[in-house]
Amino acid sequence: MRQTENRTSQLSRVPNWIWISVIGLPLTVLAIVCVLSFIQNRTSINPVALEKSKLSTAVPSSLTNTEPVIAVVESSSQLPRLDFPLGSVEEACGFNDLPPYYSSTFDSEWDLRKPLAVEECWSAMESHVGTINPFLVDIDTEKRRPFQFVVMEERFTYERVFADPTGDFVRVKDALSRPECLLTGEETNWELKDSCYAEAFLNFALINRICMGYGWEREGTQYPDNNNLTPKQDRLMWKQDFEDVWMEMKCETLDQTLEFSSEQYPELHKLVMSFQSPAGEKNAHELLIELSARLGDDAAGLTLAQFPQMVVPRGDKEEGAKFGRFAELLTNATWKELALKQAPNTDRFFQIFHMLATAESREVDTLKAIQFDYDQLVQHLCTPPSSEYLADVREDGTIVHFNDPEMLLELEPGELREWELEPEDVENFFVPKSCQEIVHEIRQQREITFRPLIDVLDKFEKAVLDMEAND
């Protein structure tokens, strides 16, 4: 009887086990399906997540970071969130989660390398920095001017500099082993541009200057009142710091055998230094840039030496402008008048317009005539310098000197002398004429028959109207 009861008890439990199995398994499957469906939906509405699997890892594996990249910041101290384009540096690197740049609660130990070690941030920054022209962010204003005003057939950028540093060094060594590539004195031969790897010389020189030398020293945006930055200005300050740290990290990935020093490559370094003029004091990087210009690289041909009166931490002395196809333009005395920041003036503008017309109409050997960026020219020429830079103005109206380094360029090297101006010049400084007025005066008062000069006036005037329409 007990056996029968036990068996009946066992049998009575079987349906319960079966019921749990039958009902529980589908519920488990249903739960898994729901989770997978949720993840898929999250991915489908997040283009970054969708594309992540398609991206190659741009950040070096040794720098890859898996920790949280943005420090937790109290919401009370955060700035208003801005709408950043998907894939931009600001979006990919989480700029909306950063604290105010000059915040009193800002942690000075906060490491910008952490967000940059994330693939999306690194890739966005590499694409961004790759569009920058190294010479357009130089701390020396005068050295920036040629790259601002002259239109190059192919823009020079960091993308070119970092494209193949090792290959560029191989090409430089090959060219230096061939006598036809070793141009000295005042020699130039632009037909050797390809066969002697002119571009590689400039690329390799900048790799050494930025990554193996004194680092990336560039002009940065600053604001007079750090305590009242707009959210956009605040993010720009952050962006500049991210750019600097990205450059440090990028340089750290390069092979140290790329350093072009007398210790590492004694014979090759000695050969390059032999290009030095008897009274010269240039280093190997500067001589490599000049050789690049001699061989026909346009970017190298726009390089100017630092003006002696500029007070900056260092000064590069390459003078590629003496050897490239822009030599006649950049060594012209009127170019100095153009490069300086001065109040709009009819006589000065007429000289500058004539210089531009001559350069645009002249064929240099078999190369095309020079083209100019009139939007940049108008921005520079039609925005007068601010009187806040005046250090002293006498009762007779004579301006003694300016505080702005751009103004000091007008002084003779090695001396501080008074810069005497005519009464008309002083009046123009404080009550400047508009560019429209100046162009009108030139058309009315000057008898112009030189067709290229008429074309320059037309292009300049159009750029003036475009700038006014966009203000």
Image: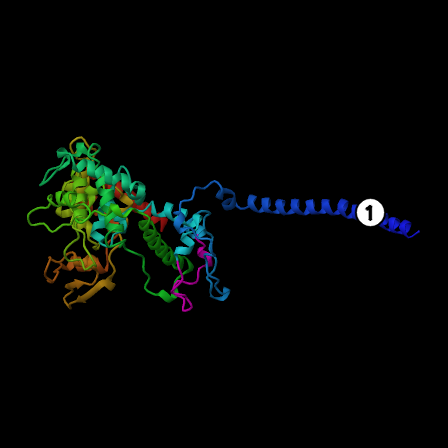
Which residue bears the numbered disc 1?
14
Is 136 or 20 nearer to us in this picture?
20
Q: Residue furthest top?
A: 366
Question: Image point 61% across, 47% down: which residue?
Answer: 38
- The correct choice, above or below, for 355 with respect to 235 in the image is above
How far across and how far down the image is residue 324, in percent?
Answer: 17, 39
The question of residue 50 being in magenta is answered with no
| In the image: residue 75, left or right of residue 442 | right
Question: Image point 50% across, 64% down: which residue?
Answer: 75
Is 225 or 382 nearer to us in this picture?
225
Element carrying mark 1:
helix
How far across and how far down the image is residue 160, in percent?
Answer: 30, 41
- Asked if residue 347 can be seen in this view, the reply is no
Question: Image point 65% across, 46% down: which residue?
Answer: 32
- Please name the colour scheme applied to the rendered image: rainbow
How far across and how far down the image is residue 330, in percent?
Answer: 16, 44
| In the image: residue 224, left or right of residue 174 | right
- Asked if residue 245 can be seen in this view, the reply is yes
| In the image: residue 250, left or right of residue 20 | left
| Dominant secondary structure of the residues highlighted in magenta in the image | loop
Task: Point out the stretch of residues depicted in magenta.
Answer: 93-111
Q: Quadrant of residue 329?
A: top left
Amino acid tagged 1? Val
Q: Residue furthest left?
A: 278
